Image (spheres, grey):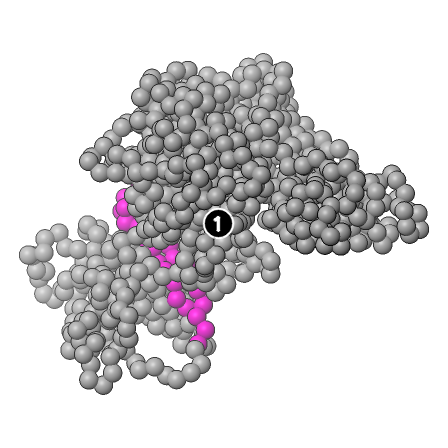
Amino acid sequence: MLTSIASSFQRGDYDMCNCSEHESSGSLAKMTGASVEPAMKPQVPLSRQISISDDDSGDQPAATDLQPFPPFRLCRLDFREGCYQINFRPTAGFVSFEGTLRVDRSAPDGGADHLIVSGDLYSKRPVIGPIPHPLPPVGNKDGDAATADAGLTSLAGSLSAVDEPAIPFPIRRPRIPIFPCARYHSYLRVTSVSAPVAVPLPKKCELTIVAEQFNYTQPPVGQFKGTFPATPSRTVTMKLAKVPAPFPFSLTGGPFYEGRLFEGGVDKGSVTLAWVSKFFRRATLEIDTLVGAVRPAPVPDGAGGTEFFDTIFARTGWQLTVVQDQLNVPVPSGVVPTNCWSSADLHALMTTVRNPATNLDAEWRVHMIVVPAKLGCSRGIMYDQIGVPREGCASFSDDGYPTSDSSNFGLAANRKQRDVPRAFLRSATHELTHTLNQIHQEQETAADNSIMTTTPSVADVLGGPATGEPGVFPDQIKLAHNTNVRHHLNHMPDPVIRPGGWPFASWFPTGAPQAADRHDFEPSELTLAVTATTDRVALGQPLDLTWTMTNTSGVSLRAPNDVGIEALFASITVTDAEGRERPVRPFVILCEHAKLSELEPGKSVTASAKVFWSTAGFAFERPGRYRVDVAVSWSAQGVMVGVQSGIDVFVDYPSSASDNHSANLVLHPEVGKWVALGGDAYHLGEACRRLQALSQTAAPAGALAVAGDGAPAPRVLDGFADLLPDRAKLARLRPELTADTGGRAERGPARAAPGRKRAAKAKKRTGRKG
C-alpha cells in the first residue's frame, strides 16, 4: 500500500496532461501558461507580481478629451512596457551606477495588473581625464511643465549647436545596454509602483518606484557563481518626473524620467530612467553547420507568417538576433559525423569553430553547432562550459524521433529532425534555452506543450499516455516558453541568465538542501541505493559512483526514465567534515530523451558518474572525511518528490612525495574537464601534458616503482586507469608533448581510447533491470 505523499502523485494511472494545453489557438498567456505552480523556489532574488496603486486603467486617463476639474492636473507619465536604462549618481562617493529596469506589463503571472518589474545595477567608476562638454539641461523639475526651451533635445538641435555638438558621430539609436560581468553590483526587486492619472495642484506628477536592493558578492577568481544575500541589502524609493528626453534617448520615442533616490526618507542621489526598447533583454545566436548537416529553418505560424528562433523569443520578451554563420564546417579528423558524437569530439569542435572575437562582456552571445549524428543520439546537447559557463550548445539534424523515446510521435515516428521542421526548431530552441540557464518543466512544474519540456514528454502530453493521433505531433507543437520559464528569462538576475554567468542549474537547490522542500518516498515504495568501487580514495583520485532507483511497491509509479546527472533529474552533493557542501554539476547536459514514465513494480533504473570535478570545483579538494549524497527529484503536480541516499568516503592523506606530485598534476581544471568529458579530449593541451606526466610517474598501484625508494606507485593512477591519453593519438594530435622521442610515441602497447561513445552511455543509463 502506498502511504507517502510522494507516492500518491506517482501512480502509473496519473493523468499528466492538462486539457488546456491541447488548445491549438488562444492568447499567449494560454499558450505558455504552466499548469501548476513551480515545485521549487529559485535560490536567487526574483521579482513577483505587483499592482499599480492607481485604480484607473494604467497611468492614462480613460478619455483624453476629458479635462479634470481644477485644481487637478493630468499626469501622462507613460510608464510603458519594455527595458529602461537606469543611471544612479549617489551624493556621496565617486562610484555611480548604471543598469537596466525591466517593466513587464503583460506578464501572465503578473496579477490583476499583469505587472512585474525587475532591474540590475552595475558599478561605474569615474573616468580620470578632461571634463567633457556637458549635455544641455533636460527640462525643469516640474516634469509635465518642462518645455523644449530648457535645452536642445532634438537630433537637429543637438547636431547644430554653434559652440559644440552635444553628440559626436556615429549616431546610434539607444538600445538595451550590456555591461561587463565583473561590474555587476545588485539586483532590484520592485515591490510597488505608483503612477497617478491626476494630482491636485500644486503637487507634481511623479512616478514612484519602491525596490528591494540585493547587493551581489562577486565569485572568487576562477569561479563563476557569486552570491546574493537571503534578505534585501536595503529598500530604496525612486521619485521620478517625466521630462523631455535628451539626445540620443529622444531617438527612441519613449519616455524619460529624472528624479531622486531615497533610503529611509534620506536623499541618496539623483536617478534617471530612459526607455530604450519594447523588449526586456537582448542576445545573439550564432549558428554554425557541419558538412552534411541541415540547420533548423523557419516554419509556418498558421497566420501567413513564419516562426523562427527570433520570433519565439520575441513572444517571450527578448530581442534575439540570429546570425547564420559558417556553413559546411569541415568534419574533424577521425570523427564519423553520422554516428553519435563523443562528448570530447563535440566539445573540441565547438571550441574550434566558435567566433574568437566574441566578447560576452559586450554581447550576450550563444554559439550553436549543428551536426548530423543519427537516430538515438538525443537530438541535442549543451555544455556547462566551453570557455565559460553556458556558452554553447549543439543540435543533431539526423537524430530524430525514435519510438523508443515515445509511442506518441505520430507521423514523426522514426524520422530525422531535418525531415520534421517544426519539431526540429522546437528541439533546437530547447537547447538554446538551456544555455540561458533554464531547466526542464518536469522538474519545476509539470510536463506541458512548451519549449522547456523534453520532446518525448511533449509528444506524450499531446497524444495522451496511451496513443497519439497522427498529426497531433508535430503539427500542434507550441513554439513558446511557458509562464514559468518566461518569468525566469525576463526577471532573474543578469548573472544567472547571461552566457558566461552562473553555471548551469546553479540557481536552484540540489541534493541535501532540497530535502526540506521535497516529499520523499517510503522505503517500501521507492528506494535509491548508492555504491562506490571503494570507500577510500587518494587525494586527486576520481570516485566511481553508481546508484540504482528501484520500485519496491506493488504498483507502477511515474518516475524518471534516466537518473544520470546529465539528464538533470539526479544531483550529487559532496559534504566535507566541516559541513561545507559542494554540488557536482553535470558538465554535459544530455537530456532530450529524458522524461517521466512508468516504472513497474520491481523494476530499476541505474546510472553512474565519476565524482571528481565540475564547474563548482573539485569534489575532494583536501584529505579527510566526506559524505557523498545522490538525490533524484521531480515535480508531481507541482509537488517536489523523490528519493535520496549516500555513502561516506575518506580521502587519504598523501604519504609520499610521489603522492603529492600526482595530486598536484591532476587537481587542475583542464584535467577536470578531461574527466568530465569521458577522456579523449586531446584539444585540452594542459590536460594532455599533465596526464602524460602522470602516466610516466610509475606503473599502476601494486607494482613497485622502478626508481626511488621502492614505494608503491601513487594510487591516483588507479582512478585514471581508463582515462589516460592513448599514446599513439597523443603522438599524432599533440606531437609537441612527445618531442623528446622525435614526435613518436613511446614503445609499449597503446591504451584503448577511454572515451565512451554517447550512444552506449545513453543506452546504459536508460537500461531498466528486472
Q: Residue furthest top?
A: 554
Instruction: Name the residue tied to disc 1.
Output: 353
Residue 427 falls left or right of residue 735: left
Q: Position of residue 314 (x, y in %)?
A: 30, 46
- For mark 1, give the secondary structure: helix
Residue 711 falls left or right of residue 401: right
**From what the image shows, is residue 59 above or below residue 377?**
below
Dot 1 amino acid type: Val
Residue found 43% across the figure and 18% down from its top: 407
Q: Quadrant of the N terminus?
A: top right
Q: Position of residue 273 (x, y in %)?
A: 30, 65
User: Is 229 colored magenta in this rendering?
Assistant: no
Q: Residue furthest front?
A: 742
Q: Nearer the viewer, residue 642 or 607?
A: 607
Q: Is residue 622 visible?
A: no
Q: Tell me the magenta residue range.
A: 97-126
Q: Alpha-carbon neighbours of circle 1 within 10 Å: few (<14), some, or many (≥20)?
A: some
Q: Position of residue 528 (x, y in %)?
A: 64, 27
Q: Quadrant of the C terminus?
A: top right
Q: How many marks?
A: 1
User: Is 124 colored magenta in this rendering?
Assistant: yes
Q: Nearer the viewer, residue 687 or 489?
A: 687
Residue found 48% across the figure and 65% down from its top: 183
Q: Residue furthest right?
A: 709
Q: Is residue 546 visible?
A: yes
Q: Nearer the viewer, residue 419 or 314?
A: 419
Residue found 10% across the figure and 53% down from its top: 63
